[in-house]
């Protein structure tokens, strides 16, 4: 959140979509109040929260804020009192939505944002008869809400634009991508595409052209992969070669007039068609439970979005922007001068272990320990001034030697901290010792020896004066710290029997594996 203030969101309707909203707010540090007349609402929300707690922290390389407080309310007025955001996710019936919106406007603050998850209704339809129409807007999410970035934010001419801008800022702080729709229209933007594809798919199955599985394979093995990173128009622009979109449209534009599709016709939903599609769908993926499919879906989404994140592209760029906001409120220091206590080991990593960092044994694999400690080294380098701007001038630190000890298991979702001690820092040489913790449980250590190198000659060179000063200052401050257990140890070397502390750590490591 950045400012440390706890804000409150009210979720009206705790189904799949409402539950996803609850998880997104909750895991970003908001207090969440859920109103749902279903007596089993809390039990039904539990698996959604469990899925979100497992998946969402995997998207960022810095830990999410402490989870907010979740409460369930039988009284609507109690749920919406003194809240910042209200998200309505009740069934898609306009009469029900009008009733709920009227009741909550009678009790909520006049400056609260009221977003509706509706996939089809226009905001002006929702605002009919409302006490304060300017307060209501469409905030249409995509499932799973706790992972998917897109929110179609649709105001009407009556909506207060200041509230819309406030909503955009809040959505970005949650890791969402608010897409403001220029004109209100039935089904907004994305669902109009989906309806066209869905309608055509129904015809292909009905006419015996393809099965449900074959249609899904055509999407996920072909254009679905391209769309995830480039969308529609950029995909076609690249298909036009160096001449771009003009060439593509000249070459393929005439095909649009050929009678290929049945976009305006809908096949009748007869029992035979429903049985055909349901039967094929069950045959396609019936070997998996829905829970297993949802787990695989979230794992795959996290993996794809993290790949996009590495390239700062599409949904990955949204994740990087969210991470930058999270860093503003984190305990990690940006520069050595920002440290409150330079004499203590420095917190250089504070993050959750992502899903794709684990191996076949269910715990973090060896390469990811190296990545975590490498990230700690990179953070330390930035703190002393060896950042991207400095590296662009031709100097950097190269790692010459690394030694990692694995002391305890680490699983996906574990919030880890790496604390870094300077063992030596003078001239060209930098010697760091990292300790990885979950709370106060020591998980691993990593020892790195680095040399400052000229990127032009690829040989050791003296760092800039400012870097030397920052490094020597931290080295002097850490000089009085005890040498950490394990520092300088060779691979396979065991502690001396005369050192009971070392022996205890060795026993701990032996028992962990």
Image (cartoon, helix red, strand yellow):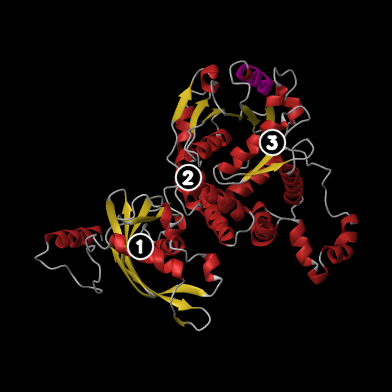
Q: Nearer the viewer, residue 172 or 292?
A: 172
**Label 2: how many Cα within 10 Å (few below 14, some 14–19, many 20+):** some
Q: How many marks?
A: 3
Left or right: residue 13 versus residue 376 is right
- Sequence-wise, which precedes: disc 3 or disc 1? 3
Marks 1 and 2 close (CB-CB < 8 Å) = no
Residue 132 falls within the magenta-colored stretch: no
Horizontal and vertical percent position of residue 178 = 66, 42
Q: Nearer the viewer, mark 3 or mark 1?
A: 1
Boundaries of the magenta span: 96-104
Q: Is residue 108 left or right of residue 55?
A: right
Quadrant where the C terminus is found in the figure: bottom left
From the image, tell me which residue sits under label 2.
Answer: 329
Pointer 1 residue: 473
| Alpha carbon separation for disc pair 2 and 3 | 34 Å
- 23, 399: nearer the viewer: 399
Task: First in sequence, mark 2 or 3: give its number.
Answer: 3
Residue 207 position (above or below residue 307) = above
Where residue 230 appears, as percent x and y from the top left, is 69, 58
Query: Hey, which quadrant is residue 96 in on the image?
Result: top right
Labels 2, 3: front one: 2
Cβ–Cβ below 8 Å for labels 3 and 1?
Answer: no
């Amino acid at each position: 959140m950045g400012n440390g203030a706890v804000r409150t969101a009210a979720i009206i309707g705790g189904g799949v979509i409402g539950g996803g909203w609850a998880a997104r707010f909750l895991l970003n540090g908001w207090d969440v109040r859920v109103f749902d007349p279903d007596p089993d609402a809390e039990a039904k929300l539990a698996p959604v929260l469990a899925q979100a707690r497992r998946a969402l922290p995997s998207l960022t390389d810095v830990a999410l804020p402490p989870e907010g407080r979740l409460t369930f309310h039988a009284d609507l007025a109690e749920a919406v009192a003194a809240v910042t955001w209200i998200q309505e996710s009740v069934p898609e019936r306009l009469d029900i939505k009008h009733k709920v919106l009227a009741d909550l406007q009678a009790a909520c603050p006049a400056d609260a944002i009221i977003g509706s998850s509706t996939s089809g209704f226009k905001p002006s339809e929702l605002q009919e008869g409302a006490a304060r129409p300017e307060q209501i807007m469409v905030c249409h999410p995509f499932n799973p809400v706790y992972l998917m970035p897109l929110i179609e934010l649709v105001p009407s001419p009556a909506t207060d634009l200041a509230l819309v801008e406030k909503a955009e800022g809040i959505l970005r702080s949650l890791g969402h991508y608010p897409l403001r729709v220029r004109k209100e229209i039935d089904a907004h933007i994305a669902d109009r595409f989906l309806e066209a594809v869905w309608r055509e798919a129904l015809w292909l199955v009905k006419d015996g052209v393809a099965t449900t599985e074959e249609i899904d394979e055509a999407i996920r093995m072909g254009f679905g992969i391209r769309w995830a990173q480039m969308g529609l128009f950029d995909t076609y622009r690249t298909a036009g070669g160096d001449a771009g979109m003009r060439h593509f449209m000249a070459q393929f534009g005439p095909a649009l007039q050929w009678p290929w599709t049945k976009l305006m016709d809908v096949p009748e939903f007869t029992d035979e068609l429903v049985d055909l599609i349901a039967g094929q769908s069950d045959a396609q993926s019936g070997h998996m439970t829905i829970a297993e499919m949802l787990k695989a879906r979230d794992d795959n989404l996290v993996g794809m979005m993290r790949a996009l994140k590495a390239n700062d592209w599409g949904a990955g760029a949204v994740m990087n922007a969210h991470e930058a906001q999270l860093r503003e409120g984190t305990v990690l220091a940006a520069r050595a001068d920002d440290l409150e206590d330079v004499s203590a080991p420095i917190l250089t990593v504070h993050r959750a272990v992502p899903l794709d960092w684990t191996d076949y044994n269910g715990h973090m694999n060896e390469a990811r320990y190296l990545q975590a400690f490498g990230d700690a080294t990179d953070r330390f380098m930035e703190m002393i001034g060896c950042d991207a701007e400095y590296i662009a001038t031709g100097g950097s630190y190269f790692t010459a030697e690394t030694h990692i000890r694995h002391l305890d298991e680490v699983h996906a979702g574990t919030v880890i901290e790496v604390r870094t001690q300077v063992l030596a820092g003078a001239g060209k040489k930098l010697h760091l010792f990292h300790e990885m913790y979950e709370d106060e449980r020591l998980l691993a250590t990593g020892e790195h020896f680095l040399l400052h190198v000229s990127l032009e000659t690829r040989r050791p060179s003296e760092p800039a004066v400012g870097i030397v000063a920052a490094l020597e200052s931290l080295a002097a401050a850490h000089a009085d710290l005890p040498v950490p257990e394990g520092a300088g140890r060779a691979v396979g070397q065991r502690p001396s029997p005369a050192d009971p502390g070392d022996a205890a750590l060795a026993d701990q490591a032996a028992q962990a594996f």
